[in-house]
Amino acid sequence: MTKRVAILISGGGSNMLALLRDMGMGGHPARPVLVASNDPAAAGLAKAAAQGVPVAAVDHRPFKGDRTAFEAALLAPLLAAEPDILCLAGFMRVLTPDFVNRFAGRMLNIHPSLLPKYPGLHTHQRALDAGDAQAGCTVHEVTPVLDDGPILGQARVPVLEGDTADTLAARVLVQEHRLYPAVLRRFAAGDRTPVLL
């Protein structure tokens, strides 16, 4: 049975588009049912709508730090879409344990580091500052601990001489767009074997 996928974004949605393109190919075990954002002006919403995917926006700003109330509002369109899988794709809000636990075992996130290295922000600069020879990205199951769930896939890129955080981020992003669709395809088919690129 085809799995129903909802995607949460906060910005331009490049990883979301990679997921939508892959789900649009024949024989995929999943299909998109909603793209939602915490920012009504997120450019990715128009891109998703142009692909024929239903969209929703719940602006987090009026909730003034009340994450529980924001998440309750976000849950309304999410639950109406009845997703089997929830993909975070550049969703820049920390979710409460109650929200995460509601989707336990079926929420995925992509993070721009080789977890468990560098959870949180500024991952590329942190890799450069540490003198790492490799950087990359990770798709993992979401748990209440930030960037800490079971790893479902990783892609590696070399750190090159003269790299800046921006040049490294651009090279990692290319791999994100390969890795996330590959992991979702496998995960939606019931296979949690990590994808390694």
Image (cartoon, helix red, strand yellow):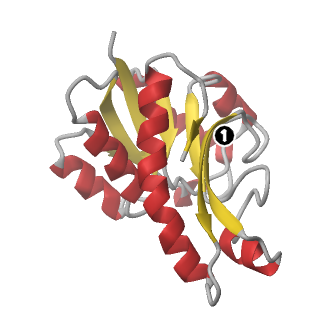
Secondary structure found at label 1:
helix
Q: Residue at x 58, y 57 (%)?
A: 92
Image quadrant where residue 131 sits: bottom right
Q: How many marks?
A: 1
The residue closer to the viewer here, 148 or 168, is 168
Q: Position of residue 149 (x, y in %)?
A: 73, 36
Q: Position of residue 114 (x, y in %)?
A: 70, 54
Q: Is residue 141 left or right of residue 45?
A: right
Asked if residue 39 shows in the view, the reply is yes
Residue where numbered disc 1 is placed? 68
Q: Say above or below: 57 vs 23.
A: below
Q: Is residue 76 left or right of residue 167?
A: left
Q: Is residue 156 left or right of residue 7?
A: right
In this view, which residue lies farthest toward the top? 1
Q: Say above or below: 114 vs 33.
A: below
Q: Position of residue 87 (x, y in %)?
A: 49, 38
- Amino acid type of the residue tagged 1 in the rendering: Thr
Q: Residue at x 29, y 26 (%)?
A: 28
Q: Residue at x 69, y 66 (%)?
A: 134
Q: Position of residue 154 (x, y in %)?
A: 61, 47
Q: Say above or below: 190 vs 147.
A: above
The residue closer to the viewer here, 166 or 89, is 166
Q: Around disc 1, counting alpha carbons within 10 Å, would you say few (fewer than 14), some (14 to 19), or many (20 or more)? A: some
Asked if residue 55 shows in the view, the reply is no
In this view, which residue lies farthest toward the bottom? 162
Q: Residue at x 74, y 34 (%)?
A: 97
Q: Is residue 16 left or right of residue 150?
A: left
Image quadrant where residue 55 sits: top left
The image quadrant where one finds the N terminus is: top left
